[in-house]
Image (cartoon, helix red, strand yellow):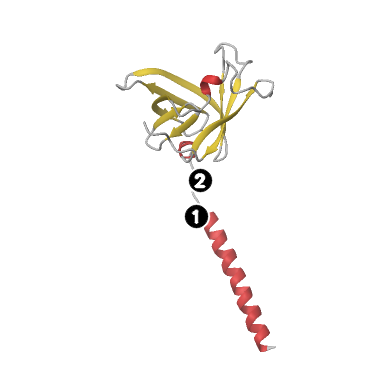
Amino acid sequence: MKNFKKVTTALLLAVCTTLFFSCKKKDDVKPMTPSETLASTFWLTTDAKNNKGEKVALTDANVVNFVGFAYFKADGTFTMYNLDDSPKMHGDWTVPADGKTRTIVAKDANGAVLFTRVVDITVLTKMEFTYRVYPNAADKTVYFDIIHTPTTHAEPKK
């Protein structure tokens, strides 16, 4: 009976210790900002949907230019590659604290600005990054959601 009490006490102590440290770790985790979330992983375009919620082939003319691998770095720079690892674009990026939009400023090899694109973010978590594009900026009723998920595909060497 004495051994039973010792074993029970040790087991109870182990369970309580585990619960205490599990809760402590959750409390210590600082939520990421939208910018930190975007820069926390490599992204791959995995899906696209139209304004009706229907799946759109990634080869569709309305979405094909948005397909590839994206690498958003914490220093505010990005690189994007096509699915065959050929370079697509590079430049600077920002996401405001509210996480509602993402802006990219694409640059040429000399650092001159090629274009600036601002898109609405519809989902930004560690498991999904989705933004919306409009074929006609004046018509917000027709759009395509470009869906990205994390990838382990390493950034190609330049």
Location of residue 94 by image quarter: top left
Q: Is residue 89 left or right of residue 143?
A: left
**What residue appears at the point 45 percent right and 29 percent down from the top-left corner?**
85
Q: Amino acid at mark 2?
A: Pro
Q: Position of residue 147 (x, y in %)?
A: 58, 29
Residue at 63% across, 75% down: 11
- Disc 2 marks which residue? 31
On the rendered image, what quadrant is the N terminus found in? bottom right
Question: Is 74 rendered above or below residue 121?
Answer: below
Q: Where is residue 124 shown, x and y percent of the image? A: 55, 35
Q: Nearer the viewer, residue 81 or 19?
A: 81
Q: What kind of residue is marked 1?
A: Asp
Residue that protrudes farthest toward the bottom in the picture: 2
Q: Nearer the viewer, residue 57 or 62?
A: 57
Task: Give the quarter of the figure containing the C terminus.
Answer: top left
Identify the residue under disc 1: 28
In the image, is 41 to the left or to the right of 59? left
